[in-house]
Image: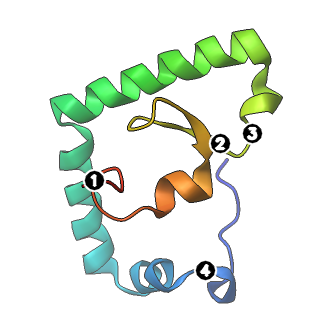
Amino acid sequence: MAPPKKPLSKLGRTAKYYRKNKKAREKKAQTDKKINSRPDQLKKRVELIQKNRQYDRKFGKSKRKGKDYDHAKGRYVKSSVNRGRRGEGGRK
């Protein structure tokens, strides 16, 4: 069973937009589907799954909480830092 939807007041600006505009939401879903099915994206996802399993076996899941694997730096960093960069990996 899916978790209950957040109220509109708790959503960010973009999430509010997609919640209100069905056509835009469907278009975004199609775009995301294309992006996520690209070979390089599939490879990245497979690599991430393997890294997470290895890390969890070695240190436990609690050590990885709130962190993402940074493909550019090659280590785990806070998710807010990893997702907050602008551009490709945040570097020139």
- Indicate which disc, 1 or 4, sits on the residue closer to the N terminus: 4
- Could you give the CA–CA distance between mark 2 and mark 1, rounded to whole angstroms? 19 Å
- Indicate which disc, 4 or 3, sits on the residue closer to the N terminus: 4
| Residue under label 4 | 11
Q: Which amino acid does label 1 sit on?
A: Glu
Residue found at the very far front of the displayed protein = 92
Camera-side residue of 31 and 84: 84
Q: In this view, does 44 lie to the left or right of 57?
A: left
Mark 4 residue element: loop
- Could you give the CA–CA distance between mark 4 and mark 2, rounded to whole angstroms? 22 Å
Q: In this view, does 76 lie to the left or right of 65?
A: left
Give the percent coordinates (x, y) of residue 66: 71, 46
| Residue under label 2 | 67
- Label 1 crowd bin: few (<14), some (14–19), many (20+), radius 10 Å: few
- Could you give the CA–CA distance between mark 3 and mark 2, rounded to whole angstroms? 5 Å
Give the percent coordinates (x, y) of residue 70: 47, 38
- Could you give the CA–CA distance between mark 1 and mark 4, rounded to whole angstroms? 26 Å
Residue 65: assigned label? 3
Q: Is residue 43 above or below residue 15?
A: above
Marks 3 and 2 close (CB-CB < 8 Å): yes
Q: Name which residue lies at 17% across and 29% down.
A: 39
Q: Nearer the viewer's eye, disc 4 or disc 2?
A: 2
- Indicate which disc, 4 or 2, sits on the residue closer to the N terminus: 4
- Indicate which disc, 2 or 1, sits on the residue closer to the N terminus: 2
Mark 1 residue element: loop
Q: Name which residue lies at 58% across and 22% down.
A: 52
| Residue under label 1 | 88
Give the percent coordinates (x, y) of residue 75: 54, 30
Camera-side residue of 6 and 41: 41
Q: In this view, does 87 lie above or below 60?
A: below
Mark 2 residue element: strand
